[in-house]
Image: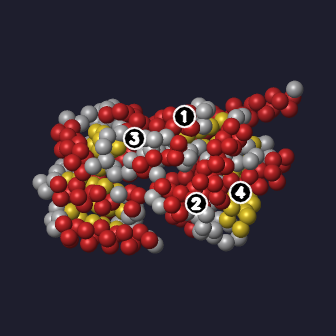
Amino acid sequence: MRILVIHHSFNSCGGGERVALHLIRLLQEDGHEVLVGTTERTDWYYVQHVVGIKLKKIPKEYYISPVRLRAFGIYQRPLTALHIARLRDKVDLVINTHGDATLIPADIVYLHFPVVAYFKLSCLRPYFKYSKSPLWYLYFRPYYEVQTRLFHRCFRDSILITNSSFSRTVIRKVVGKDSIVIYPPTELKDYIRNLYNNDREDSVIYIARFSPEKNNHIFIHLAKELPEYQFYLVGSAHGRGVEYYNYCRRLADKLNVKNLKIMANVPHETKLKLLASCKVYVHLFPTEHFGIAPLEALASGLVPVVPVLSGAWTDICKFGKYGVGYLRFNVKEIAEKTQEAFDRWRRHDRENLLTHLSKFTPESFYRGIRTVVNILASERRKGKLD
């Protein structure tokens, strides 16, 4: 088939881009011709190098701007509907991998998480970044109004795919339609090598890019609360993240935290060695839709401590089977759960983990996507014959 994949931008090289690139690679390997519709021109060499996913062929790309658009990010995504309007009659299938509702619907939508849920659901509202100031609220409000009005029209006849049962529940409440859970493809081979390593120190690690919404600074307070353990705060620091990284270092000095190492932009091998030496992983991002880092930690033999309000709890930790969850986002409770995780590590059941971890591999993602695409392809062929 000829398939159009719309994605607002690949240049940010985040988790959504990883999913989209894996999807494109799968479609190409299955013999489909893939076209791509974006809002800005893709630097394919940079994207493939950073994300680490090589495509069989660089797809033909239709873009709105030849330069990177750095402002009004959430308002760029619906613009990809222009490509659907232009190419709808020239392709057999349209797949939307950014997930936002568009004026012209796609056949398949990978809806990672509906952002408007942070405004609509009271349990999520405390973590809503656009409510931090009146200006941010005014920025978000038009997007909210447009998206909520488009949901029914855009998603009515589309197949919705999402990344966790947590996101699926939220989508059902906000969009009013069910979705299929197909986990993001995660390479776990490097991590599983350390699964059965028992030679570890009593240490805790948190891996997240240095950014205020990741709450890296809370980890410093946690280290202060638990001086009997060693703590490692690891993450990338680029652009505005450098300023926040420096703030975290100053905070550690101010609190005189001696049992903490803060490490920025470490090589992959260093991260693997740190995970192999620690027993507990703490995740400090409530409402995380999925959570690659907690999954990597679990595969490395650590006990994750994660927010109950997240996909890391519902899908990766399986409601406590493979980790510990905290309900209230405060240092005291997280410290108590961290100590509980150390007790769990001594009797951690790792025998059934490999079967559980196999659900999150690229191969599992490929099987799920291939099934959905083949069902639609069969329906299209039947429709043409009729």
Q: Is residue 123 visible?
A: yes
Q: Amino acid at mark 2?
A: Tyr
Contact? badges 1 and 4 (CB < 8 Å): no
Comes first in the chain, label 2 or label 4: 4
Residue under pointer 2: 139
Could you say where residue 164 lies in the image, as x and y percent from the top left?
Answer: 48, 38
Write down the residue under mark 4: 79
User: Which of the two discs, 1 and 4, labels the residue nearer the N terminus?
Assistant: 4
Q: Secondary structure at mark 2?
A: helix
116 with respect to 361 (left or right): right
**On the image, which quarter does residue 303 sit in?**
top left
In the drawing, does residue 313 fall left or right of residue 48?
A: left
Quarter of the image with the N terminus is top right
Q: How far from the left and from the top, in percent, is residue 145?
A: 64, 48
Q: Earlier in the sequence, mark 1 or mark 2?
A: 2
Q: Which mark is residue 309?
A: 3
Secondary structure beneath disc 3?
loop
Q: Earlier in the sequence, mark 3 or mark 4?
A: 4
Q: Are marks 1 and 2 in contact (CB under 8 Å)?
A: no
Comparing marks 3 and 2, which lies closer to the viewer?
2
Query: According to the image, label 1 marks what residue?
Result: 173
